[in-house]
Image (cartoon, rainbow, N blue to C red):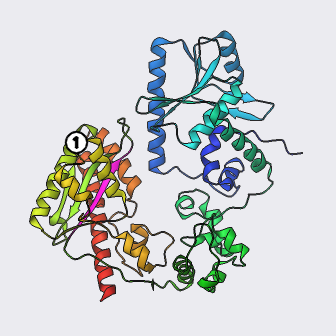
């Protein structure tokens, strides 16, 4: 009989992402080499370790702190009543759980509460709640578990999260008992970042898994299968009007898009289901870069990039800030730049891709209590110059892509065919570059890092410019 595997609360992240992924984590494929963590994940780990170490140093100043070396040592330290146990090793032999919280902190009652140092700004993430609630169960007391956040705040995990831990433990017992990998659905956003995608995706493609199609996911695919549509080919051949409404796929228009998306999977064709309405005026292309990994508790937009006519490097304007200390100055400089552009181009259109730029303008207006500022009111008002170029694409076109992000559309050689200067660049890449830039002591190296980030931002706004031209040529 195969021995029962131990459940690790630290598996909560993989578990929430995909049950197959957490099964692979506990049953590594023999032919697969250990995948290297990407630079962004490595940065998160490094910053997390630094935060944990800083908390440890703070606790050492006021408490007796001892680092545990084994489960047995942990129990000895608990029996000895050590005030803070660092890196404790917990084992629940009865329920087959092993856990490693960052700290065990002794309370006035003599009991211990688990505590984790987390960069997250709140304890609302399910991954955090599951882990800490599981640690509480292992300790066998009703004391709150603590989350010590990167911004210095603390939150508690209490009894109302026990349900999450119970569900996690029950499902993990079932998953780990399986002799082979569990069934899974494809998710472009999750699977493209998963180290097991090279194993799973060929299987999905071979059986024409419906969720390879944009707009079809685990919430509506089972309903299609119940109607006899189990493959991409069957979806491509289906009559949209004959498909019954289902969760997250309702109305003839949306079902037509799903069928055409399936057709595009085979033909690589673009389908027009409406007119791509573009506003008239002088277009300035707009893109921002933000750093979520700072101690303020809020994203810091460190680069506001704008590309105006004649749309070349010389007409690329930007506002750059060196750290969170310059956050407000950067925001005010952006507003001044927009006001100047408004005066320069009376028919100004600020083109951006997706809602990210608008949501950040709203956050900054609230952060600095500037909702009534004339430029802010104009940007967010009924006659706003802001235009999300992604909207007409998703409304009027069906493209042969798995995701409707800027890069999948623009890099596709059958569509816009615009290529970034650095193929590795991206939003996570820029965060890593910026954080490293802030800590880089060598001036020449810092200058090169800044240049690389600016080049990436320029490529982003140039991409939306090329996308605009492609759409206009399509409408001719």
Q: Quick one: 339 or 459, which is closer to the camera?
A: 339
Q: Is residue 132 above or below residue 303?
A: above
Q: Along the line of sight, which residue is nearer the eye, 170 or 256?
A: 256
Q: Please tell me in which quadrant of the rendered image residue 136 appears.
A: top right
Q: Is residue 369 left or right of residue 76?
A: left
Residue lying at 34% horizontally and 43% vertically, measured from the top left: 436
**Residue 377 position in % (x across, y down):** 22, 54
Which quadrant holds the C terminus? bottom left
Residue 288 in magenta stretch:
yes
Q: Depth check: 23 or 406 in front?
A: 406
Task: Relative to 448, say whether 145 is above or below.
Answer: above
Q: Examine the structure image and report whether residue 304 is included in the region drawn in magenta.
A: no
Assign the magenta stretch its main secondary structure. strand
Residue 249, given in percent of the width and then of the height, sits at 58, 71
Q: Which residue is mark 1?
A: 328
| Helix, strand or loop for disc 1 | helix
Q: Residue at x 72, y 39 (%)?
A: 166
Binning the other alpha carbons within 10 Å of mark 1 as few (below 14), some (14 to 19) or many (20 upward) gives some
User: From the viewer's perspective, is 402 left or right of 230?
Assistant: left
Rendering coords of residue 333 (x, y %) = 17, 49
Residue 412, can we see it?
Answer: no
Q: As displayed, is residue 467 above or below residue 305?
A: below
User: Whole-percent x and y of residue 269?
Assistant: 48, 85
Q: Quadrant of residue 442?
A: top left
The magenta region covers 283-292
Q: Residue at x 60, y 62 (%)?
A: 197
Does the rendering let one see residue 83?
yes
- Give the farthest residue toward the right: 1
């Amino acid at each position: 009989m195969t021995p029962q595997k131990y459940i690790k609360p630290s598996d909560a992240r993989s578990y929430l992402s995909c049950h197959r992924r957490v099964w692979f984590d506990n049953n590594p494929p023999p032919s697969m080499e250990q995948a290297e963590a990407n630079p962004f994940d490595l940065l998160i780990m490094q910053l997390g370790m630094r935060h944990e170490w800083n908390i440890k140093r703070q606790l050492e100043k006021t408490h007796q702190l001892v680092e545990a070396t084994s489960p047995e040592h942990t129990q000895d330290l608990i029996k000895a009543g050590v005030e803070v146990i660092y890196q404790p090793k917990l084992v629940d032999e009865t329920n087959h759980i092993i856990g490693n919280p960052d700290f065990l902190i002794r309370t006035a009652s003599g009991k211990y509460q688990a505590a984790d140092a987390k960069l997250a700004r709140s304890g609302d993430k399910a991954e955090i709640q599951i882990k800490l609630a599981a640690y509480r169960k292992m300790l066998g007391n009703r004391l709150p578990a603590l989350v010590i956040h990167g911004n210095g705040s603390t939150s508690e995990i209490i009894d109302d999260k026990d349900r999450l831990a119970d569900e996690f433990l029950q499902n993990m017992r079932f998953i780990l008992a399986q002799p082979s990998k569990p069934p899974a659905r494809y998710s472009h956003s999750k699977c493209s970042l998963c180290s097991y995608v090279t194993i799973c995706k060929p299987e999905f493609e071979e059986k024409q898994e419906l969720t390879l199609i944009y707009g079809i996911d685990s919430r509506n695919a089972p309903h299609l299968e119940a109607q006899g549509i189990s493959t991409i080919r069957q979806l491509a051949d289906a009559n949209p009007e004959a498909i019954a409404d289902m969760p997250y796929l309702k109305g003839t228009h949306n079902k037509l898009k799903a069928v055409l998306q399936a057709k595009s999977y085979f033909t690589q064709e673009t389908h027009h289901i409406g007119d791509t309405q573009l506003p008239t005026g002088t277009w300035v292309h707009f893109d921002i870069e933000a750093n979520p990994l700072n101690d303020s508790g809020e994203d810091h937009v460190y680069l506001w990039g704008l590309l105006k006519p004649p749309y070349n490097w010389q007409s690329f304007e930007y506002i750059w800030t060196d750290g969170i200390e310059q956050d407000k100055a950067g925001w005010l400089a952006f507003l001044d730049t927009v006001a100047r552009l408004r005066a320069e181009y009376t028919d100004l259109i600020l083109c951006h891709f997706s809602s990210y730029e608008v949501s950040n303008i709203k956050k900054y207006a609230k952060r600095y209590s500037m909702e009534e500022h004339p430029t802010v009111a104009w940007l967010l008002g009924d006659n706003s110059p802001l235009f999300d170029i992604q909207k007409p694409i998703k409304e009027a076109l069906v493209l042969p892509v798995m995701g409707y992000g800027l890069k999948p559309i623009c890099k596709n050689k059958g569509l816009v065919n615009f290529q970034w200067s650095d193929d590795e660049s991206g939003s996570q890449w820029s965060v890593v570059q910026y954080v490293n830039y802030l800590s880089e002591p060598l001036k020449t190296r810092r200058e090169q890092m800044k240049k690389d980030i600016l080049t990436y931002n320029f490529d982003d706004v140039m991409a939306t410019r090329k996308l605009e031209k492609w759409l206009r040529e399509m409408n001719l």
